[in-house]
Image (tube, rainbow, N blue to C red):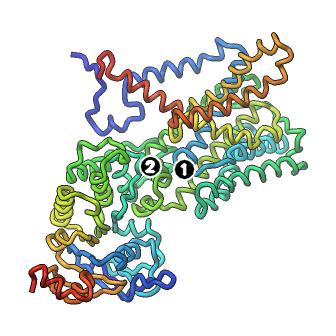
Amino acid sequence: MGLLDIKDISLAFGGIQALDRVSLSVEPGELYAIIGPNGAGKTSILNCISGFYTPDSGTILFEGRGFSKERPDQIAKLGIARTFQNVELFSHMNVIDNMLLGRHHHYKSGFFKNAVLGYRAEEENRHRLKVEEVIDFLEMEQWRKHLVGSLPYGVQKRVELGRALAQEPKLLLLDEPMAGMNQEETEDIARFVLDVHEELETTIVMIEHDMDVVMDISERVCVLDFGKKIAEGSPREVQKDSEVQKAYLGEDYETVMRGAGNP
Amino acid sequence: MAVTRFCVRTYEQDLRIFPSLAARISLIIFGLVLLGLPFFVGKYVVFVACVCGVSVISALGLNILTGYTGLISLGHAAFMGIGAYTAAILSSKAGFPFVAALPLAGLMAAAIGAVVGVPTLRLKGLYLVVTTLAFQFITEHVIYHWESLTLSDRGIILPSPALLGYKLDTYESFYYVILFFAVAAAMFTKNLAMSRTGRAFVAVRDRDIAAEIIGIHLAKYKILAFVISSFIAGLAGALYAYLMGLIGPDHFTFNQSILYIAMIIVGGLGTVFGSVIGAVFMVLLPEVISAVTGPIASAYPTFSPRVGAISVIVYGLVIIGFLLFEPDGLFGIWIKIKRYWKPWPFTY
């Protein structure tokens, strides 16, 4: 029994079958990568897990508990955090406030305690401390009070990761954390993802197009193509899989492989 | 060596509402000036100050909804009207005392606010604006035509309010009541903005998808924003009704709603300081205009019929000017001034 068990989920948009009976299981403490060509249904899986889409059929179990009609905010409370392919930050707030928002469901006091009975500095302090830990962890001290909208793209991606970490999730979903980054930024993020995985022992499900990174850091890889799971296994196994080679390189994959010096 | 520059050392300090000593001292001086105001100025100035106070309260309410949560409402005057009429009917017909009518007026407006908030769960942007606009006109219509209850355009006369046996029948005495509520509303809004709830509001405004994914219940916070905002509007409306002593349907028209939107745009969206200064600015603007145009009109009698139009033109110009040149409003100007003087006397 894994931390996250997805059984036979299907999802269709009109005539397009985005997901076709996909099953996968993520063990606690694992770094699991989902790869596949564009439009393979990778983000759709994440959207199903985080509650933006409801699958047409199949079940999703998190810690053995099934959920079906939960809203995204309820799923976040269960301990699932995620980042987005296109950065989804609160651009008019500074880095600290963005991350404090990640602490939202860890706060105990509600509206009346906050506004009517006076401002709760004690609780605010406690969460601020946690946020500062995350800021230290991601080495972004220098941007602490900068407005997020004014930061470069690579840093914004890191803020988003920080916001997800501030939630102290049991399961972290990363949707293309390295997209649109240069070599150096990619290496930085890869290092942070590994740090999160090893030091915080968070289970991570990652979608990524950068094959070097995926093959380097992930423990298990699942390959999707046109909404179907075509392979699963260690990076080495997946690379050798003929279905995967066909999906990425086309029908004539053998010629291509030979041309690249891989008999 | 004396510490000349304000410096944050702990999180507590960083989280204070007024972090610097200078801010606290100037706030105390400002408070004393407000407390002493009725002793130094004439009756009319006190009345204008009362209107300023009511507008400040109401603008704070609208800023919670529009500035912080990003739900644009063109029906704010309607909520004030509901509060005002609730207070007026309760006190004139049922004989409710001031202390009971005031919170009930707020609650009535809040209850209706919760209902008006429901469409926000499905509507965004312009569609929501049109919904609140419709609410504004429906309320105006109901107030005008439910004659048995509201006496239509004859208006309702309110008994003068009393508090703990003291009659608050002068502008000077009622000024302190309004001052108390204005300060309370400002503190409430500031507390709210700096807390978890306020941050969630801004998150809903900036990016609702991201807000949802980090565990913010969108429906709850959108409705909450409407409830808080309309409660404050209802309270402001009730205070306005007691201040005037007579209310009619033309006090809470669509134009008033626009005026409140103008206040928070001119002052600065999503700031407490902006709501206060914007409200005061927009209330004093017509006073200034009439002070300037009054002598002109008396010197050139042929000009006097057009004086009214001038104030409308100036209103429009002010809003356009702010939107074009200073979208952050007076608050933005204030921040720029502060930033300019911060390193003084050095250049940077």
Residue B37 in the image: above or below residue B168: above
Question: Sequence order check: which comes first, mark 2 or mark 1?
Answer: 1
Horizontally, residue B243 falls left or right of residue A149, namely right
Identify the residue shown where x is 41% and y is 81%. A18
Taking depth in this image into account, of B289 and B135 the one nearest to the observer is B289
Q: Where is residue A20 in the image (x, y as percent from the top left)?
A: 39, 87
Label 2, residues with CA under 10 Å away: few <14, some 14-19, many ≥20 = many
In the rendered structure, the residue with mark 1 lies on which chain? B
Question: What kind of residue is marked 1?
Answer: Gly
Q: Where is residue A196 in the image (x, y as percent from the top left)?
A: 20, 62
- Give the numbered dot on residue B199: 2
Taking depth in this image into account, of A159 and A261 the one nearest to the observer is A261
* Quadrant of the image containing the N terminus of chain A: bottom left
Taking depth in this image into account, of B314 and A136 the one nearest to the observer is B314
In the rendered structure, the residue with mark 2 lies on which chain? B
Give the distance between the C-alpha atoms of the residues marked 2 and 1, in whole angstroms: 12 Å
Q: Look at the image and tell me whether residue B88 can be seen.
A: yes
Identify the residue shown where x is 32% and y is 47%. A151
Question: What kind of residue is marked 2?
Answer: Arg
Taking depth in this image into account, of B296 and B9 the one nearest to the observer is B296
Q: Where is residue A224 in the image (x, y as percent from the top left)?
A: 30, 82
Residue B72 in the image: above or below residue B19: below
Quadrant in which residue B237 is drawn: top right
Q: What element carries label 2?
A: helix
Label 1, on which residue? B70
Q: Position of residue A87 (x, y in %)?
A: 36, 58
